[in-house]
Each structure stands twice: as C-alpha cells, then as structure tokens.
Amino acid sequence: MTQENMDPSFVGEGMYRENILDHYKNPHNKGEIENAEIKFTENNPLCGDVITINLKLNDHKVDDIKFSGQGCAISQAATSMLTDEISGKTLEEIKNIKREDVVNLLGIDVGPVRTKCAVLGLVAIKEGIKEFENK
Amino acid sequence: MLQTKQLMDIEKIRKDFPILNVKVHGKPLVYLDNAATTQKPEAVINSITDYYENYNANIHRSIHKLGEEATAAYEEAHRKVSDFVNASFEEIIFTKSTTESLNLLAYSLGNKLKSGDEIVISQMEHHSNFVPWQQLAIKKGLKLKFIEIDENGLLKEDSINENITNKTKIVSLTHISNVLGTINNVEEIGKIVHENNALFIVDAAQSVPHMPVDVKKLDCDFLAFSGHKMLGPTGIGVLYGKKDLLEKMDPFLYGGEMIKEVTFEHTKFNDLPWKFEAGTMNIAQGIGLGTAIDYLNKIGMGNIEQHEKELIKYAMEKLNEIKEVEIYGPEADKRSGLIAFNVKDVHAHDTSQILDSEGIAVRAGHHCAMPLASVLGIVASARASFYLYNTKEEIDKLVEGINKVIKVFK
Ligand SMILES: Cc1ncc(COP(=O)(O)O)c(C=O)c1O
C-alpha cells in the first residue's frame, strides 16, 4: 500500500480498523522457535511493549519467523503483518525495509508517537540481524 | 455537584484557565492528566510575562532598579512557598523539579554514608525516588530495601516495621502514589523512622498540590515537590529541609551566588537557602510558582482536597460499574484524586488513543514506576487524575469514552 492510499481521517477510533483488530486479536506467526538462529527482544519504554523475534534461517533466507510478547494493538498488529511480509525474504531484503513500509502495511496514519509502537517489531528484527551478523 | 458548588465555584475557576477553551479533535478538552502536569491559570501566565516585559534582570547581584525588583519578587516567591508548607524562609530551596530535589539529597546525604548502611524506600516509588537511591547504593555498597504493598495498594505495616531498623540511615517515601493514589500515613511512619535515628524524606509531588501539607505536623526532615503539578510553570521545584540538617550538608552544585567569599585556596558558602541555589536560577518560574500559590490559597487547599474527594468517589463508583474495567489501588477513602485502570484485553495506549479522539486526555504507560507495574503484574495502565477545575460531567465523559473503547475492541 502506498502513502496516497491512506485516509487521513483514520485517527482515534478510526485507527482501529477491522484488519488491525483482526491481527491484534488473532496474530499471525505468534510463538517461539526453539533453535532459531536469530532471537532478539526489543521494548518500548514509553508503554512497556515488548516483542521478541525468532528467525530460523535457511541459506540466508527466512525459513520460519515467530514473535512473542505483549503490547498495544498497533505494535502487535504491525508485527503480525510484518512477519507475514518477510517470510521467505533474504536478510538483505529485510534490511532494506523502512519504517514507512511498516506504517504502509497498517494503512493508517499513526502519528509520530504511535509510529514507535508500529515499528517495534521491525526494530527487533533489524537489531537481531545485526547481532547475528556480528557474531 | 450541589455540595461542590458550595465549596468552590467551578465554572468561575474554569474561566481562569485559558487552555480549557481549547478544542481537541473538534471536541472540548477534558483534561484528566493532572498528575503528569497541571494547567496554568491566566494569573500565572501573566506574572511570567510581567517579569519579562517589565523587570527582567538577574537577581542578588545587580544594583539597579530592575535587579532590585526581580530580587524582591523572587524572594517573595520563596516566602510564599515557605508559608504554604509552614516552613521557615531558610528551609526552602528552589530546584528544577522534585527529581532534582531528590537527586540533591541522594548526592549530599549520600556523601556521608558508608558501605553497609541501609536506605529504605517502597515498591510504589516513582523512578525519581527510586533510581537515585538505587544508583547511590550500587556506587557506595549500601543496602537498598523496599517496603512492600498489599493487594489493596497500601504499604504493609509489618513490612514497614521489618525494614526500618537501627541500621537504616535514610527512609524516603512518597506521600501519595502517582499510580495507586494511595495516601501514605507519613506522619506515623515518620515516628518509626525517627525512633531508629534515621532521616525521613517525603516525596510530596502528588500531595502538596492537592491537600494542605504542614512540614511541622508531618515532622519530616526533607520534603520535595514540583511547581508544574500545582498550577505553576515547569522548571521550578522545591526542596524543604530542616534548618539544622541543611546547615550541616554539603552543597550539591557549586558556582556563583552560593558563595560568600572565594579565595584562591578556599570558599566560604552562602547562608541558607542560597547555599543550595548555585548559578542563575529559574527566576520567572520561581515568581510564577509564587503566583500559583496565591491562586491556590485564594481557593483554599482544604476546599480543593474536598472537591477532589468527591470527584474520586464519583469516578470510583462509575468505573466500578463497568465490568470490563480493572482498577488498581485502594478504596476511594484511602486515595487521592487519581485512578489507574485497564480495560480488559485492551492495552492502555489503545484506550488513551480512543479517549483522545473524544477530547479526553489521560496518561497511559507505566507512569515512571516500572518496579510497581511489575508488582501489580501489568505492563501499563491508563490513568485519570483530577484537579480543582475538573467536574463530574467530565467523569461522565470519561465513562462514555471507556464504553466506546469496549465497543471498538469487542
Ligand atoms: C510521586 C512523584 N514523584 C516524583 C515525580 C517527579 O516529578 P518531576 O518530573 O516534576 O521531577 C512525580 C511526577 O510525575 C511524581 O508523581
């Protein structure tokens, strides 16, 4: 989804559109992977959101991805959507994902404060990759 | 409402606060985040402007008309704060905030502590009365102990007695919890502290703005609070300390204005309270705080306390009726005018976002008390906190807003 597709009136309760609430209540790829090569936890001290990312790799491609943790609808839904998005992608491709891409996945204007919530999962993934590559 | 009207004319009070005319997302502002910071009456805003427009000068050093006026106004503000909490002039030090006041104590009192000495705080402390002691303890090998809370959010009596012993050097406790609203019986705890020959510090950030506080009656050794939580500007905080103790303490900051005489070899420090006010202070903010105190005195702290008691009783009743709402902390009669809660299966951030779309401002998060959140077993909560300008109608709006949150997340 591109920036133009976003309706600026999605503020407040408008933010909680059907697809976001669906992902929040029934998140995709929730759980842990026992022997994941990449495991990284990131938290947002502002609201206490915590997300742990588990990535299983096969030939530098994402073979399996799971996340655990708790937080607000925006952080949980965005991470759920993001995990769908990056299955099968290479680490290089994932490194090129930008904050705006995650906001676009949500399809709403989250505003500066909630953007921190939206990108929490992405930050965890990127930091996890960094740690993995520095090993 | 009727009873409240007799105490205070809320409609008239609301007219004194320009910001209460602001519309948020097209709706009237319902400001329920007073524990974070309060709004400012026109008189306070004007007194700051008046200083900058008519007598802006540095204090205590300029022998000219403006300098004399500014010094007189700043010292007058000191006097107003002293009277407000029943301290003497030498016992009131201006700082930047409660946080700075507590850091000053941790630094200055901490200097004299030795490895093995004990400091006691509680599980319900704000980070500003937590982290300075924790870091001091780590640095100097002190033991930091925590008074526990019970399931109602009250300090456990046996935990108070177990933790405060003759090894204790400092006890630092919040008067009112900014998350639970619990009003701690600091007067009684202070007696136990003094029986053990320890120093007693009270974090009064949430009490001085909301109820009459008398340092002589509490018999605490030190007390800290912030101007911005009591209608004053940001950047000005207060530290009260008993005179004989302040005299024996080392300054926290060194520099201009806190000295009497400086030679190449040594420095003679200034008299109290100036010994602790190094460098150019927040002059406008100090004067603004003085004006805020005039305003509070005009309304009467007893009246404000009573008004908030009615609001919290009403809010607790209304929120208790909603079965999806979980409330933290004690019953209405043991708490001040704030209420932290969660809507079942909804993160506090989402709750406050939806309330915001209705023009209602509440706080969401751990409220700078992460250790307490872990004791409560939650990551975050939403918090509504009241002040003299809030009304029962605004609490009704909060209830409507919460019902909307429930509907959206159903
Ligand atoms: C109980 C308590 N102590 C200390 C503070 C810190 O106040 P300030 O941020 O003004 O230093 C607060 C403010 O949130 C508070 O509620």
Image (spheres, coloured by chain):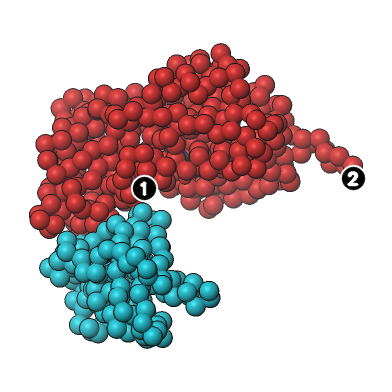
Chain colours: A cyan, B red
User: Of helix, strand and loop, which one carries label 2?
Assistant: loop
Observer-side mark, 2 or 1, equals 1
Residue for badge 2: B264
| Residue B210 in view in this figure | yes
Q: Position of residue B278 (x, y in %)?
A: 68, 43
Residue, disc 1: B366
Q: How busy is the neighbourhood of tag 2: few (under 14 within 10 Å), some, or many (20 plus)?
A: few
Rendered position, B355 above or below B296: below
Classify the position of the C terminus of chain B by image quarter.
Answer: bottom left
- The chain carrying label 2 is B
Q: Nearer the viewer, residue B281 or B322?
A: B322
Q: Position of residue B122 (x, y in %)?
A: 45, 32
Instruction: State left or right for residue B252 relative to residue B173.
Output: right
- Where residue B81 appears, x then y in whole percent? 52, 31
Answer whether residue A101 is visible to the viewer in this image. no
* B388 lies above or below A98: above
Kind of residue indicated by mark 2: Phe
Q: Position of residue B403 (x, y in %)?
A: 12, 49
Q: Residue at point 50% right, 24% down? A: B163
Q: CA distance from mark 2 to mark 1?
A: 49 Å
